[in-house]
Amino acid sequence: MTDSRLALVVGLFVVPALLLWLGHRMRRQSAARRRVFWGAVIGYLAGMLVTLVAIHYPAVLWTGGGWRTAVVHWGMVVGTAVGAGGGIVATGRGADG
Amino acid sequence: MALSASTRPAAPPAADRRPRSGTRGWARWMFYSHLWLGVVTTGIVLIICVTGVLLNHKRPLGLMPDVPNDSPGALPQSLPLAELAARAERAVRPEVAASGIDRMDVRPGDGFVKVRFDDREVHEVTVDLASGRVLHVGLRNDVFLEKLHSGEIFGDGWTLLSDVAAIALAILVISGLWLWLYPRARA
């Protein structure tokens, strides 16, 4: 299995399972951790939406390089990472303010 | 007429209203299977749903060519298969022809053969059986969608992924129904 294919499988199954596991007892977590968690959830959902569109449009097999192939394989993983990063940034700003 | 406090039947003690431990364990299993399966299989179930809807409407959406043949010839007048394949190969780009022919779908009633190539975009050439005239050159997008729907697009063994998603969906439906019917069993 290639790295890209592995990223797609991780994005489809491992990331949501990890987020669900991290989401347990969220009320007991600090505000900063909650922001990172919700950022990751929102990023994951946005990444999934973009990936779903990229997978189906156009209705032709994705192979080789290009933006579409990259989005199909890495969309959900990168979306989660970007969302969590956004949560960290928001936490930093919240602490400054 | 409203009952006074003295005539109203006494509520059963809290311990009696509480579901039995076996029922609670079953309810917890239903709840957590619904939660975990629902979240973990969201992506794959969505892909299967979208491809299923698109495949149901593949003709109106133009995902497969719908070629009419106004003057279909009789089957005995057909050209040899090798000749029809050669004409189809000449109708597409050299790189598509080089990918090879995946299959030839002969339609005697319509008087044509659909020659499908094994390229990434899945080109299909429709050739008149009797005259060898190329009627249409187009893409079979539904082949891609079928492979995506079944999981075959990821490889041969990946069709099991579609089976897992289908089983997960069945468990989700059953557990969802159970949770709706017995909402307090988990308490």
Image (tube, rainbow, N blue to C red):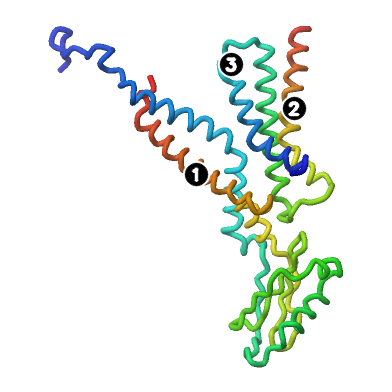
Kindly identify which numbered label has been placed on residue A81: 2
Q: Label 3 vs label 2: CA separation? A: 19 Å
User: Which residue matches tag 1?
Assistant: B167
In front: label 2 or label 1? 1
The residue lying at 38 percent from left, 19 percent from top is B187
Identify residue type, mark 1: Ile
Identify residue type, mark 3: Met
- Residue A69 position in % (x across, y down): 78, 46
Q: Left of B185 or right of it: where is A47? A: right
SS at mark 2? helix
User: Which residue matches tag 3?
Assistant: A26
Vertical order, A41 against B2 (above or below): below
Q: Earlier in the sequence, mark 3 or mark 2?
A: 3
Label 2: chain letter? A
In front: label 1 or label 3? 1
- Residue B5 position in % (x across, y down): 17, 8
Q: Left of B112 or right of it: where is B16? A: left
Label 1: chain letter? B
The residue lying at 65 percent from left, 52 percent from top is B148
Decide: marks 1, 3 in contact (CB < 8 A)?
A: no
Label 3: chain letter? A
Crowdedness near tag 3: few (<14), some (14–19) or many (≥20) residues, C-alpha within 10 Å: few
Crowdedness near tag 2: few (<14), some (14–19) or many (≥20) residues, C-alpha within 10 Å: some
- Residue B85 position in % (x across, y down): 76, 79
Q: Left of B145 or right of it: where is B178? A: left
Identify residue type, mark 2: Ala
Q: Quadrant of the N terminus of chain B?
A: top left
Kindly identify which numbered label has been placed on residue B157: none
**Residue at far right of view:** B94
SS at mark 1? helix
